[in-house]
Image: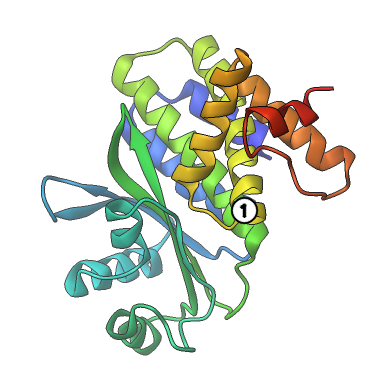
Amino acid sequence: MFDRLAQVLYSSSSYEEVYAAIVSGATRLVDGCDHASIMLRHGGDRFATVSASDDVARMVDALERQYQDGPCVDAIVDESPQMDPDLMTASQWPAFARAVLRETPVRGAAGFRIVAAGTKVGALNLFSDRAGAFTDESANQGMVLASFAAIAISAVQNQVRADTLAHGLDSNREIGKAIGLMMAFHKIPDTAAFELLRRTSQDMNIKLTEVARKVVQHHNDGHGSAPHVESASTSRRITG
């Protein structure tokens, strides 16, 4: 399914097409996702929804802007993904959660930042109508999808050729998977997980994408065992 989404992104020639493909794909690719949107930052604390799968997603985004609080706003401002699988139980965004529960069918929400050209430009927002539907796997899928969005947006911005974009998406998917595994195992934010991979890449003098592939391969070969990327020395355990 990710491969089919990538093909759509390869042929997209405008931001609008990229955004529409991402939010449409989110409801099919992310476990538990019923609605999705992309909200971008327009200077300071101003946010705007540029694409949404439906009116429910647009309504939740509007409530985030009204309360200046919620998973998308926090994902853009902070350094890590934001996810609350059950807004009905002690939500970290109480005022926002009460409004969402009152005005929409949404019961779970998540936000994943989108970084293009080194700048946090916005976030991918995912919403579920069932409390507890979002899982750790949903989070990993959301991070990969947000990575797809970032590369596709950058490609359109720079008019990158489709074959170059295809290679970038494939590489970024591996990096996204590896970051998700490192976050889950070490209980660290995405920036710290990426730094572990980057530092290992430098210490071992091999490409970052190759390090990411080895982390994912190690995980798959071990049927879910923890990846060993803690330092240059421990990283060598996954190279054999």
Looking at this view, is 170 or 198 the one in front? 198
Please name the residue shown 63% across and 27% down the image: 232
- Residue type beneath disc 1: His
Instruction: Find residue 202 and report its image quarter.
Output: top right
Looking at this view, is 143 or 206 the one in front? 206
Residue projecting furthest to the left: 44
Percent of width and height locating residue 136: 64, 61
Percent of width and height locating residue 68: 20, 69
* Residue labelled with disc 1: 186
Q: Is residue 39 left or right of residue 203?
A: left
Q: Is residue 31 visible?
A: no
Please name the residue shown 88% across and 38% down the image: 221
Q: Is residue 66 visible?
A: yes
For mark 1, give the secondary structure.
helix
Percent of width and height locating residue 126: 47, 61
Instruction: Find residue 82 and report its image quarter.
Output: bottom left
Q: Is residue 86 left or right of residue 18?
A: right
Please name the residue shown 60% across and 12% down the image: 205
- The image's colour scheme reads rainbow
Report the quarter where the C terminus lies.
Answer: top right
Looking at this view, is 59 or 116 the one in front? 116
> Is residue 113 shown above or below 89?
above
Report the quarter where the N terminus lies.
Answer: top right
Percent of width and height locating residue 169: 55, 25
Please name the residue shown 45% across and 56% down the image: 81
The crowd level at tag 1 (other Cα within 10 Å; few <14, some 14-19, many 20+) is: some
> Is residue 181 shown above or below 118?
below
Looking at this view, is 83 or 240 the one in front? 240
